[in-house]
Image (cartoon, rainbow, N blue to C red):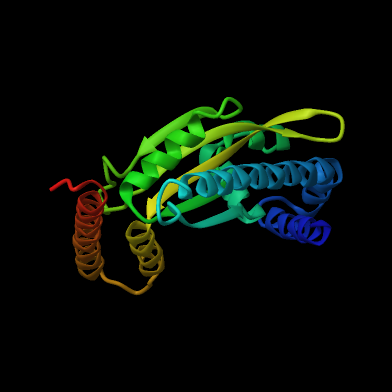
Amino acid sequence: MQRILANGIESLEAALRTRLNTEESREWIREQSRPFRELMSYYRCALMEVETKFRVLNEELSLEGEANPIDAIESRLKTPESILEKVDRKGIEFSVEAIEEHIDDIAGIRVICSFESDVYLIAESLLRQTDVQLIERIDYIANPKPSGYRSLHLVIAIPIFLYDEKKIMKVEVQLRTISMNFWASLEHQLRYKKNLSDEEAAAVAAELADLAETAADLDRRMQILRNYLDDGEE
């Protein structure tokens, strides 16, 4: 972990040089590098806490059925470059305190479920836990983005227990089905294809939106089949 954090500071310093002159970047690193390393370490601890919660839920809920409701769990910390880009975009003060207060998705976990009903089951099970505070909920499954993107987004706050203190940290959680994740992963790759004319870009966007509907239809039909096999519901 120490090597990862050290590499993060080197990456941060390189990113700072593109925004500040050399002396300013050195001054910021002198004053803020230790607080920044600590903050990233706290977010990493928060990720471990939330991932453990999901693994426990998956184990418990699997006892009630034939398969685990969670197919995969992925976690990530924003890179220093991404953090600085968001600082610029949001126009917030360039300090560790402001970064912690105003940026909600530095620590992120993606939970991939087999069925749409599992997405909501896992989300509600997490939010019922007494040490989990919901800050924001955006349901892009019920209300997809114009691009066709679907996912359930939660921003939560949880406690982490350190050697001599307790800290409350924010984590962004994305819950989606396998088909939603497949579409989002490919859409992310295609979005960065270069040298497309406006006409080509519009055609690609239309095709992606249509494919998102196809993926959503697959989820709906799989859910209906599951309900029928589980409960005899038509």
Vertical side of 121 occupied by 183: above or below: below
Residue 113 as seen in the image, left or right of residue 1: left
Which of the two residues, 183 or 208, is positioned nearer the viewer here? 183
In the rendered image, the vertical position of residue 114 relative to residue 108, given as above or below = below
Q: Nearer the viewer, residue 79 or 136?
A: 136
Q: Position of residue 106 (x, y in %)?
A: 60, 45
Q: Quadrant of residue 12?
A: bottom right
Q: Position of residue 179 (x, y in %)?
A: 32, 61
Name the quadrant of the N terminus: bottom right
* Residue displayed at 20% across by 51% down: 228
Q: Which residue shows up at 12% across the image and 48% down it?
A: 234
Give whichever of 5, 199 is nearer the camera.
Answer: 5
In the image: residue 179, left or right of residue 23 = left
Q: Residue furthest bottom?
A: 195
Left or right of 35 on screen, residue 169: left
What residue do we see at 32% from left, 48% from top? Answer: 116
Q: How many marks?
A: 0
Residue furthest left as drawn: 234
Q: Position of residue 214 (x, y in %)?
A: 20, 61
Hey, which quadrant is residue 161 in on the image? top right
Q: Nearer the viewer, residue 233 or 21?
A: 233
The reply to whether residue 6 is visible in this rendering is: yes
Q: Position of residue 194 (x, y in %)?
A: 38, 72
For the point 39% across and 51% down, the residue is 176
- Residue 107 in view, yes or no: no
Q: Is residue 53 above or below residue 137?
A: below
